[in-house]
Amino acid sequence: MAVSVWNIDPSHSAIAFSVRHMVVSKTRGRFTKWSGQLRFDAANPAASSVEVNIDPASLDTADAQRDAHLRSPDFLDIEKYPSASFSSRKVEVVAEDRYRVTGDLTLHGIRKQVVLDVTYEGAGKDPWGGERAGFVATTAIDRKDFGLVWNKALETGGVLVGDKVELTLEIEAVKQAAQVAA
């Protein structure tokens, strides 16, 4: 089986994040504008790859004031860094339907290697004759590794914003139809 191309369907997918807030809870959010493509070979997953492009300005935590602060130079600085991306370098089989995808995450102008733990959720035909596949990927990053260092100390100890950011990607991808040679 050859590598097939799958376009991520953002209307049926999500990139979500969570980070500790004031040591006692987590703030959750998502990115609403992004795109991506998978090159997937079920018979030889090591030949697979993924590319994702994210618009950091589309950040949404359900709080307009917090979102504006996260877009500011204190955090993502979207005027200076209007895009973020992930590009895989290696795909490894961990177990049946489970993979480890190593790649480069570029965020806030800094590129670092990250590892995604991926579960293949399956595939099926949609009502329009297309084929869809689902994947869930998770990872955690240290925001300071990407130059996101703003914080405030709390009177009771600890800091306002945790360093560890948990990322979850829920992906539904649509297989590109094979092109017929003219």
Image: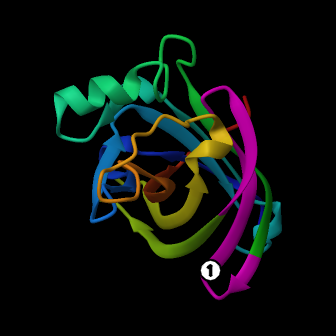
Asked which secondary structure carries label 1, the reply is strand
Specify the quadrant that holds the N terminus: bottom right
Q: Position of residue 103 (x, y in %)?
A: 75, 52
- Magenta span: 93-115
Question: Farthest residue toward the top?
Answer: 79
Q: Residues within 10 Å of mark 1 (few under 14, many from 20)?
A: some
> Residue at (64%, 38%) from the top-left corner?
146
Task: Reply above or below: 119 against 141.
Answer: below
Q: Position of residue 151 (x, y in %)?
A: 44, 39
- 101 or 29: which is nearer to us? 29
Q: Is residue 132 left or right of residue 126?
A: right
- 4 or 168: which is nearer to us? 168
Task: Reply above or below: 181 against 162.
Answer: above
In terms of image quadrants, where is residue 179?
top right
Task: Please name the amino acid that badge 1 sits on.
Answer: Arg
Task: Reply above or below: 181 against 7.
Answer: above
> Residue at (41%, 20%) from the top-left corner?
72
> What residue sits right under mark 1 in the picture?
98
Q: Is residue 31 left or right of residue 7?
A: left
Q: Position of residue 32 (x, y in %)?
A: 33, 36
> Residue at (74%, 79%) from the top-left corner?
93
Q: Position of residue 11 (x, y in %)?
A: 31, 43
